[in-house]
Image (tube, helix red, strand yellow):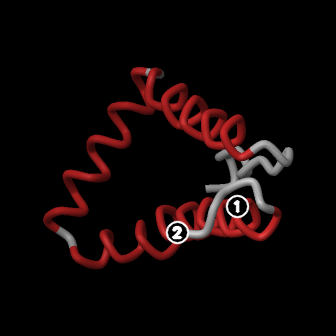
Amino acid sequence: AAAHPSVPDTGAIRADLIAILAANAESFRSPSRRGLVAALLADALRDPNLAELLRSRFFGPRADAIVARVERAIARGELAPG
């Protein structure tokens, strides 16, 4: 998880969200990473402990950081509430 880029906060929410999507897409372009992710997700379907570990240590914190960025954008008036 430490190798994943942080969620940018440049003050331009559209550019920040595009940067997040681009970074995510780039990380899956590598054949070795793509295979690793596919294997982890397949194993997580069979192993509830692994699924919870991925949720709590990887996907959840990343999603929380993106939500926090969107909330800051709303507070700043970059996005309309809702």
Quick one: which residue is furthest to the left in this view?
46
User: Looking at this view, is 54 or 79 the one in front?
Assistant: 79
Residue 27 in picture, x, y percent from top left? 53, 31
Task: Give the amino acid at mark 2.
Answer: Gly
For marks 2 and 1, give the one nearer the viewer.
2
Residue shown at 37%/31% (left/top)? 34
Residue shown at 78%/42% (left/top)? 12
Choose the circle earlier in sequence order: 2 or 1: 1
Task: Give the amino acid at mark 1.
Answer: Arg
Tell me the element at label 1. helix
Tell me the element at label 2. loop
Residue 74 in picture, x, y percent from top left? 70, 65
Q: In which quadrant of the rendered view does residue 76 lie? A: bottom right
Residue 10 in picture, x, y percent from top left? 85, 44
Q: Is residue 68 above or below residue 17?
A: below
Residue shown at 59%/66% (left/top)? 67
Q: Is residue 63 above or below residue 41?
A: below
Neighbour tally class for label 2: few under 14, some 14-19, many 20 plus, Cα within 10 Å: few
Residue shown at 63%/61% (left/top)? 80
Q: Which residue is mark 1?
A: 69
Neighbour tally class for label 1: few under 14, some 14-19, many 20 plus, Cα within 10 Å: some
Q: Which residue is mark 2?
A: 82
Q: Are marks 2 and 1 in contact (CB under 8 Å)?
A: no
For the N terminus, the quadrant is bottom right
